[in-house]
């Protein structure tokens, strides 16, 4: 449901896995040290799931909607696909829970290397405020994700470079203290 690995540096199709040779996987514990949290949940029962409820309550995720990425459901599909894959950060957490399909959330580690996080149905991820990241569909070309947020959502992406934002400095400070 959730797997992560370091990416190669080829410019081939973004929807391919882009493993290094040999493959270099990253554990969920390592991701957590970057502030990238993840859970495996029961996506068939998200409406009644107590575990999801607990996460939402403990982290204050009051807002919820769904984002379905396919040409029929997403207005300006091609444009959005491009902007999702531009390296950017947010001043708040990016929280996604995959209820159908799959996709890649790429995050930059402390040394600027790309880690590709593959999420499938049942995978939930929190990207910390200030982390540089991007998103792409995989070769199955479909994802439906629950989007969560603390209070009124702000989806603004700040494309790289945006290193002067407080969110960026706070994250870097947390990294020096090991999260
Ligand atoms: C984002 O912010 O990159 C997205 O919402 C991508 C679609 S959610 C799987
Ligand atoms: Ni984002």
Image: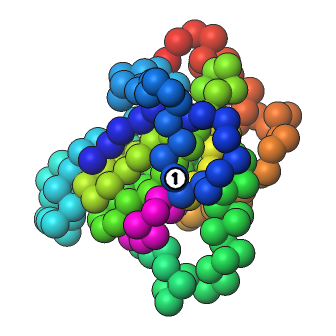
Q: Going by the picture, which residue comes out furthest to the top? A: 177
Check disc 1: other Cα within 10 Å, few if <14, some if 14-19, many if 20+: few
Q: In this view, does 46 lie to the left or right of 168?
A: left
Residue 142 spot, x, y in % from top left: 42, 71
Tell me where residue 81 sits by quadrant: bottom right
Q: Residue at x 60, y 19 (%)?
A: 174
Tell me where residue 76 sits by quadrant: bottom right
Closer to us: 90 or 71: 71
Q: Is mark 1 within 8 Å of ligand 1?
A: no
Q: Which residue is drawn at 57% across and 10% down?
A: 177
Residue 164 spot, x, y in % from top left: 85, 34
Above or below for 88 versus 62: above
Q: Which residue is drawn at 61% across and 86% down?
A: 75
Give the color scheme: rainbow, by chain, secondary structure or one colour: rainbow
Above or below for 80 versus 118: below
Q: In this view, does 116 lie to the left or right of 162?
A: left
Residue 55 spot, x, y in % from top left: 29, 46
Task: State the extent of the magenta-drawn residues as a range.
Answer: 137-145
Q: Which residue is drawn at 50% across and 62% down?
A: 137
Q: Is residue 169 visible?
A: yes
Closer to us: 124 or 134: 134
Residue 30 spot, x, y in % from top left: 43, 21
Q: Name the residue under label 1.
A: 16
What kind of element bears circle 1?
Answer: loop
């Amino acid at each position: 449901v959730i797997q992560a690995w370091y990416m190669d540096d080829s410019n081939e199709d973004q929807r391919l896995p882009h493993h290094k040779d040999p493959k270099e996987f990253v554990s969920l514990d390592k991701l957590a040290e970057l502030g990238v949290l993840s859970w495996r949940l029961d996506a068939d029962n998200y409406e009644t799931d107590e575990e999801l409820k607990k996460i939402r309550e403990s982290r204050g995720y009051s807002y919820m909607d769904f984002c379905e990425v396919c040409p029929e459901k997403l207005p300006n599909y091609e444009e959005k696909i491009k902007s999702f894959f531009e390296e950017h950060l947010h001043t708040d957490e990016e929280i996604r829970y995959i209820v159908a399909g799959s996709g890649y959330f790429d995050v930059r580690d402390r040394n600027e290397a790309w880690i590709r996080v593959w999420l499938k149905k049942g995978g939930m991820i929190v990207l910390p405020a200030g982390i540089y990241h991007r998103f792409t569909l995989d070769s199955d070309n479909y994802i439906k994700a629950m989007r969560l947020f603390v209070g009124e959502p702000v989806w603004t992406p700040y494309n790289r470079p945006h290193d002067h934002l407080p969110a960026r400095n706070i994250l870097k400070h947390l990294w020096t203290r090991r999260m």
